[in-house]
Amino acid sequence: MARVRTGVRVVGAVLAAVLGASLAGCSSTGGKRAEERAKAAEAGRPAVSTPRWTFAMVTHAGDGDTFWDIVQKGAKEAAAKDNINFVYSHDDQAQQQAQFVQNAIDQKVDGIIVSLAKPEALKDVVGKAVKAGIPVITVNSGSAQSAEYGALAHIGQDEEIAGEAVGTEMTKRGLKKAVCVLHEQGNVGHEQRCAGAKKTFGGSMENLYVEGTNMPSVQAAMQAKLQADPSIDAVLTLGAPFAPTAVKAKQAAGSKAEVDTFDLNESVARDLKSGALGFAVDQQPYLQGYEAVDLLWLYRYNADVLGGGRPVLTGPQIVTADQAAKLESFIKRGSR
């Protein structure tokens, strides 16, 4: 989770410079091409002359999840630059997600981006895409299964490594007893986050499973847990929408526990600045969408791949009150 973007214009300029250098070596022609791509991106025009390929992104996002809005923003901006017809679909039910991937195969898209929160449910259909000659990139979830399923690369944070960063940070803060709140049962990434945090946390940590689609129920479950055990001094949520709910549960329970969370949004940024939250873990969802589309374009255009068979990490970055203030303008525009 380490990158500060200063706008679409700069993103286009940086990527243009990299691509220009790869196409033209150290010649002056490379610089000219980079400049042309930057100007096109700034004007909102495609920065390339390649065919208008269609890329489909299929994720496990539930309705109203702001994290995936940021992923989409990055993907759409890369698609505009790369002359890509971008098609997005999502469902938090793995069977429906698999059907969306099958639909993309049937429509003979030119590339597929898919998240593997429940990898076994997507294994067969991802294999069908690869067999059909459609390049696949996985994002966000499923880094361990990505190469096995035949994907070109995985873009996202390693969830266990991210969890380990959390456990280390909580230990530095002197916390002793924590609850890790899992809002989607069966999501392997969530289990990995909590497992990683337990691994490096100097205190004790237990999992609390809640029904993430019912926020009042989530608050009630956290409140009951805090009331039943006043010694809990830390609550870790695994998604930005659940952080303010944890704060409400803490207040209603009369608890002094610190609330920490994965992911950023405007509400999390405000609560970090006010001290209502201790820290957040940013995996840079904008990067996940942007780089996935851009890498598919690079693969189709130039047979380029990234990662060398290993995940391309977009996180973790620990964000505290000071960092949140610096990132606030980017968060408000929906790119962090």
Image (spheres, rainbow, N blue to C red):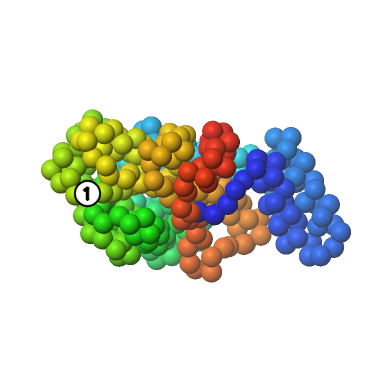
Residue 301 visible in the picture: yes
The answer to whether residue 330 is left or right of residue 186 is right
| Occupied quadrant, residue 65 | top left
Type of residue at label 1?
Answer: Ile
The answer to whether residue 18 is left or right of residue 192 is right
Instruction: Return the x and y of residue 293 as percentages of the image width and height.
Output: 56, 48
Instruction: Return the x and y of residue 148 as percentages of the image width and height.
Output: 39, 66
- Rendered view: 72 above or below 283: above
The residue positioned 74% from the left and 35% from the top of the image is 43
Q: Extreme right residue here?
A: 28
Q: Secondary structure at mark 1?
A: loop
Residue of label 1: 232
Instruction: Return the x and y of residue 71 as percentages of the image width and height.
Output: 49, 42
The residue positioned 70% from the left and 41% from the top of the image is 9
| Occupied quadrant, residue 177 | bottom left
Q: Extreme left residue here?
A: 228
- Rendered view: 294 above or below 270: below
The answer to whether residue 50 is left or right of residue 191 is right
The answer to whether residue 32 is left or right of residue 147 is right
The residue positioned 84% from the left and 52% from the top of the image is 32
- Rendered view: 102 above or below 310: above
